[in-house]
Amino acid sequence: MNIAIIRLSSLGDIILGMPLLQLIRQRLPDCTISWVSDSRFADILDHQPDIQRIVKLDLKRLKKQSSLSRLVREYKNLANAGPFDAVIDLHGMIKSAVTATIMGGRRFGFDRKMLKEPLSTHLYHHTFPVPLELPAACRYASLGLQSLGLPFHVSGLSDLEPFLFSTEQDLVITEGFFSRERRNILFVPETSAAYKNYPPDKFARIATRLNENILICHGNEQEFSTASRIAEQSLSVRILPRLTLNQLKAAIGRADLVIGGDSGPTHIAWACGVPSITLFGATPVCICPTERNRVIKTPSPVNHRRYDSSDQSIREISENSIMHHAWELLNLPKR
């Protein structure tokens, strides 16, 4: 069976969709799976043994520098990848539904009531209603398995094997930042939206209280500025160099604990089987918590269709609550 999965962006949502690969492979071991992604995020899929082909679309450049030749090239890239027995659109937008149509094959997507762009459902052969209240990882897995006529149970996501991988070469750039004497804890203080960020001053106090080797990752100038602010307040903190996605996977995979907000790098820890604490305020819990992967969610109600960007409740999560989970996780046996 030839299967295509479409999730173009963002980094976190691609990661949250990837457990579906393992669930499909368990039930259809001989199938061939392709994944279509925006080229900015596609490297997160590298070295994934359940994917036979990664189709990368340069959507950012196509949008900024549109030209007929580039459009034709991207069209051929998609058309030549198929045809497929099933094309599963985890993204649910018009651009992803058009992508699915070009690829050829029977197309599946979410029910229109779940989507910000319900017109995309006109391009699917079949849609499935999946409760918005489910964590995103569960919604993607449910849609994928139902599209293939396979049963889905939420419990299937509680016993996943790690599914993000890197190479030894990807470790080289951060080799000197990791300690052999102290535990290595990675902070992810910035997310894609300010209302999802935990205060840097509180991160700094937690770093001091942990008194371990604290590392901070960053991907842009704003994130570097926040990392620097934390480092100025705690002698335990070191700022990692800016990393590629594969290098970031390698660094997180080597950490003893990751603490951060609702963001791609924090979800990488969950996907690598690394202990983590993910902080949620106005956004819903999107991963399936495990003994090693804890979540702290504020009491704020969540509007699943439009998050409240004025909700700053994540700032009120107590440092003591994070410390409690951190010490428990640091004392878990290594995998």
Image: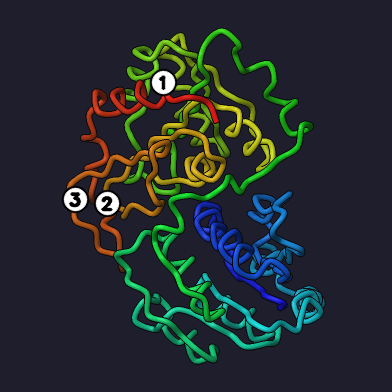
Under circle 3, the secondary element is loop
Instruction: Label 2: state its secondary structure.
Output: loop
Disc number placed over residue 300 in the picture, else none? 3
Residue type at mark 3? Ser
Query: Between tags 1 and 2, which lies in front?
Result: 1
Q: Mark 2 sits on what residue?
A: 282
- Other residues around mark 3 within 10 Å, as few (<14) / some (14–19) / many (≥20): some
Q: What is the distance, in whole Å, between disc 3 and disc 1 at their CAs? A: 30 Å
Q: Residue at x 54, y 43 (%)?
A: 268
Mark 1 or mark 2, earlier in chain: 2
* Mark 3 touches mark 1? (CB < 8 Å): no
> Is residue 321 rendered to the left or right of residue 258?
left
Precedes in sequence: disc 3 or disc 2: 2
- Residue sitting at x 76%, y 63%: 52
Tell me the distance, in whole angstroms, between the alpha carbons under discs 3 and 2: 6 Å
Q: Which residue is mark 1?
A: 331
Residue 269 point in image, percent of width and height: 51, 39
Frontmost residue, 33 versus 15: 33
Please name the residue shown 52% across and 50% down the image: 160
> Measured from the top left, where is residue 73 in percent x and y?
81, 75
Q: Is residue 103 left or right of residue 8?
A: right
Q: Nearer the viewer, residue 296 or 32?
A: 32
Indicate the amino acid at tag 2. Answer: Ala
Please name the amino acid that badge 1 sits on: Asn
The answer to whether the residue labelled 3 contacts the one labelled 2, judged by CB atoms less than 8 Å apart, is: yes
SS of the residue under disc 1: loop
